[in-house]
């Protein structure tokens, strides 16, 4: 991130004087909503066009049906995804990202970028 852009973000996000308790609470809230092994891969899968339960499940190696079901319910409760039921025969259920979910798309891209760089760093050791 550019220095000017970073400084602007610091001024917008952090209070003056700094309130560490507020900052820690904000970090904890974020980790609570996005934390865990599966939420970000699920969001990534849905944002990459996988809308049906089985499509999402197949796109994420190692996730169980039960875990995916639980995570999707929690993510819906936190308004990260929208569950749509189409009463056709058979009933069709699809999942899509909300605008709220897409609001942290840049953060996810930065995490992917950092993760790739980290993997390269570790390979060189």
Image (spheres, grey):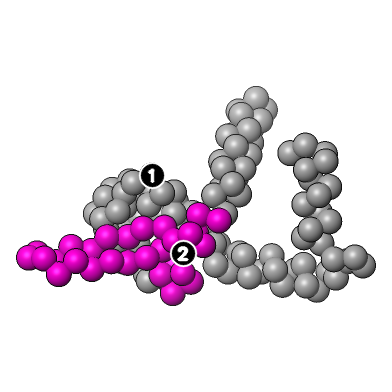
**Which of these two is toward me, 52 or 88?**
88
- Sequence-first disc among 1 and 2: 1
The verdict on residue 111 being magenta is no
Residue ranking furthest to the top:
124
Tag shown at residue 48 = 1
Q: Is residue 115 visible?
A: no
Per the rendered image, the range of residues in magenta is 74-103
Q: Position of residue 7 (x, y in %)?
A: 83, 47
Q: Residues within 10 Å of mark 2 (few under 14, many from 20)?
A: many
Q: Position of residue 36 (x, y in %)?
A: 52, 61
Left or right position of 35 against 15: left
Q: Does 122 appear above or below 19?
A: above
Tag shown at residue 4 = none
Q: Residue at x 59, y 46 (%)?
A: 106
Query: How far separated are the C-alphas under marks 1 and 2?
Result: 15 Å
Q: Residue at x 31, y 49 (%)?
A: 50
Q: Which quadrant of the figure contains the C terminus?
A: top right
**Which of these two is toward me, 78 or 54?**
78
Q: Residue at x 77, y 52 (%)?
A: 9
Left or right position of 1 against 123: right
Q: Is residue 106 visible?
A: yes
Q: Image quarter for residue 24?
A: bottom right
Q: Which residue is mark 2?
A: 80
Total numbered labels placed on residues in the image: 2
The verdict on residue 102 being magenta is yes
Q: Which quadrant of the figure contains the N terminus?
A: top right
Q: Image quarter for residue 109?
A: top right
Element under disc 2: loop
Residue ranking furthest to the right:
17
Q: Position of residue 30 (x, y in %)?
A: 62, 65
**Which of these two is toward me, 12 or 48?**
12
Q: Residue at x 41, y 49 (%)?
A: 47
């Amino acid at each position: 991130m550019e220095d000017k852009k970073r400084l602007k973000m610091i001024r917008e996000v952090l209070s003056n004087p700094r309130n560490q308790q507020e900052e820690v609470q904000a970090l904890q809230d974020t980790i609570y909503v996005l934390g865990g092994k599966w939420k970000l891969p699920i969001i990534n899968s849905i944002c990459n066009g996988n809308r049906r339960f089985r499509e999402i499940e197949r796109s994420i190696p190692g996730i169980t049906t039960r875990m995916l079901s639980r995570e999707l319910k929690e993510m819906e409760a936190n308004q990260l995804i929208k569950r749509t039921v189409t009463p056709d025969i058979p009933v069709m259920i699809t999942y899509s990202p909300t605008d709220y979910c897409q609001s942290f798309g840049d953060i996810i891209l930065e995490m992917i970028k950092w993760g790739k760089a980290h993997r390269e760093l570790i390979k060189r050791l």
